[in-house]
Image (cartoon, rainbow, N blue to C red):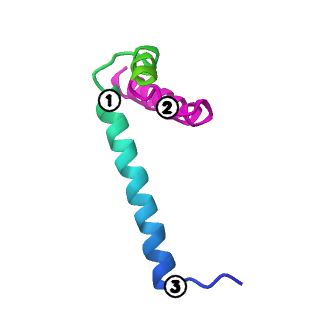
């Protein structure tokens, strides 16, 4: 049985904060672009050391951002 402790809760909150920081940085990188393809091309250069299977997640986030952004603009 899993017991939620203060230590586990703090560790989980730190993980969430870390991912939010990563996402915030990703948004600052992609917002100057007008299309997902342009943003992804730049991300490939910027994040060249990122493993391909991790980049697949970046691609989903970028495409999701532009899909939502396009819907709110049009």
Query: Can you identify the residue that label 2 sits on?
Result: 64
Q: Residues within 10 Å of mark 1 (few under 14, many from 20)?
A: some
Residue at horizontal 46 percent and vertical 71 percent from the top: 11
Q: From the viewer's perspective, is 1 left or right of 17?
A: right
Q: From the viewer's perspective, is 25 left or right of 59?
A: left
Measure the C-alpha gap from mark 1 to mark 2.
15 Å
- Pick whichever of labels 3 and 1 is earlier in the sequence: 3
Measure the C-alpha gap from mark 3 to mark 1.
36 Å
Q: Residue furthest right?
A: 1
Residue at horizontal 33 percent and vertical 43 percent from the top: 24
Q: SS of the residue at dot 1?
A: helix
- Pick whichever of labels 2 and 3 is earlier in the sequence: 3
Q: Residue furthest front?
A: 49
For residue 52: magenta?
yes
Q: SS of the residue at dot 3?
A: loop
Question: Is mark 3 in CB contact (under 8 Å) with mark 1?
Answer: no
Q: SS of the residue at dot 2?
A: helix
- In the displayed structure, 18 sits above or below 54; it is below
Q: Foreground residue, 47 or 6?
A: 47
Of circles 2 and 3, the one toward us is 3
Q: For the N terminus, give its image quadrant.
A: bottom right
Query: Can you identify the residue that label 1 sits on?
Result: 29
- In the displayed structure, 41 sits above or below 29; it is above
Query: Can you identify the residue that label 3 sits on?
Result: 5
Measuring from the top left, give residue 14's x and y in whole percent: 41, 65
Question: Is mark 2 in CB contact (under 8 Å) with mark 3?
Answer: no
Residue at horizontal 34 percent and vertical 23 percent from the top: 73
Measuring from the top left, give residue 12's x and y in whole percent: 48, 68
Magenta stretch bounds: 46-74
- Pick whichever of labels 1 and 2 is earlier in the sequence: 1
Question: Total label count?
Answer: 3
Of circles 1 and 2, the one toward us is 1
């Amino acid at each position: 049985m899993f017991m939620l402790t203060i230590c586990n809760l703090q560790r989980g909150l730190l993980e969430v904060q870390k991912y939010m920081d990563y996402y915030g940085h990703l948004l600052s990188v992609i917002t100057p672009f007008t299309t997902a393809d342009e943003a992804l091309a730049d991300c490939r250069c910027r994040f060249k050391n990122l493993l391909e299977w991790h980049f697949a997640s970046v691609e989903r986030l970028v495409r999701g951002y532009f899909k939502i952004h396009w819907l709110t603009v049009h």
